Image: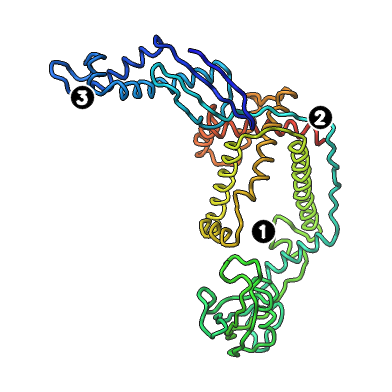
Amino acid sequence: MEIKVEKLPKSEVKITVVMTPEEMKKYENLAAEQISKEIKMDGFRPGKVPLEMVKSKVGEVSFEAHTAELALPEAYAEAVIKNKLEVVAHPRINILKNAPLSFEATVAVLPEIKLKDYTTIKVKKTEVKIEDKDINEVLESLQRREATFKDVEREAKKGDRVEIDFKGLDKDGKEIPNTASKNHPVLIGDGALIPGFEDGLIGMKKTEKKSLKLKFPKKYHAKELEGADVTFEVTMNRIEEREMPAIDDQLAIKISAGSTKTLVQLKEDIKKNLVEIREEDARRAREDEFLGKIADMTEAELPEAMIEEEINFMLERSKKNMGAQGQDFDKFIEDQKAKGKDLRKDLRGNAEKQIKLRLALKEVYVREKVEATEADMNAEVQKILATYPEKYHDEIKKMYAKSSEGYRIMENQIRLNKVLDKYLK
């Protein structure tokens, strides 16, 4: 077999393979065996018709095409393995001749990269500070959570919880779909409704009716209502006054189910939690900055197939996330097209950056000789097991068994953490 590999732009190669008549013989015999199982010839059992008789029966051109079809996958695989090519997509095949087989395969391969000296990257470490106002904001949120409400016979004001009936009408007075509700609970000032709606409820009395002329935001989850002028017919059904508990030891005991006995201790717990959260946020921000700089330091000719595959992955991830939130992904795509936006084009830049980052990290792991040892893997699995009841342990162990997708993801995460720990001290 003669194999020639030619480098092409954008990390593609053209593999030219020419097979000899001798190499084709085993595929001719296999083709004859397969075809003879499907044709009937007097005096011969299925699968036992002589090669020349099979050729005569189906025609030489058809037989040669079938033979080439059998030979091609193995010949292509052999060419890839012998030349140690790291292919990243399906090849485009051009058959030059069937007998003996010769063909060209154009395929994207893992691109070579140029990675600058990432050891010079500096990412500033920010100091986490927790002030009294931060703690007070949390306390006030907890206080609101424990508030009670009582019915009142007065005008509604900010902070009240009310129940209303409402429906949205267009400029012609026709009701707009999905803009009506009965006994709808609203905490005035909470900002749950569109701008102007809650302010319009202030001053209303029980059983009072009112018209509110409002405009929906330009960006809204229901695309058909974006920027729409709508008149809401509102009826006030109930007004409740909020009574806030005192911020004291009793609140601390109630909120913590008795584990915290004093307000002072509650404040210390809040501060500790805020420090942990903000330190984690700061750590992630530094990691993102570090990885972003590595990606920017990476030069590579990315094959189109890799970029398209990454965009497909990003779109599929968005579809799953939107589905989990009860949003219609297909409708979102249609809306974007209607606005003249091309999502694939918009995602291309991020896709290229993500691919470059993965390629760069692969190079970093080699340079740094970073490995995820069996001890590392076992320690991570034990951490996960500790967070689940024992009845789930066997299933979790299977998820992270060797050769599994979970194992591969964990292995890469351990390597990444080792690099980040080294450069983000």
Residue ID for mark 2? 117
- Crowd rating for badge 2 (residues with CA inside 10 Å; few <14, some 14–19, many 20+): few
Q: Identify the amino acid type marked 3.
A: Ile
Which dot marks residue 257?
1
Q: Identify the amino acid type marked 1.
A: Ala
Q: Identify the amino acid type marked 2.
A: Asp
SS of the residue under disc 2: loop
Quarter holding the C terminus is top right
Q: Residue at x 70, y 75 (%)?
A: 189
Q: Verify CB contact (< 8 Å) between mark 1 and mark 3.
A: no
Residue 123, image x, y percentages: 83, 40
Q: N-terminal of the two: label 1 or label 3?
A: 3
Q: Residue at x 58, y 51 (%)?
A: 318
Q: Is residue 385 visible?
A: no
Mark 1 or mark 3: which is in front? Answer: 3
46 horizontally vs 259: left or right: left
Q: Residue at x 56, y 44 (%)?
A: 312
* Residue 20, quarter of the rendered image: top left
Foreground of the two, 55 or 300: 55
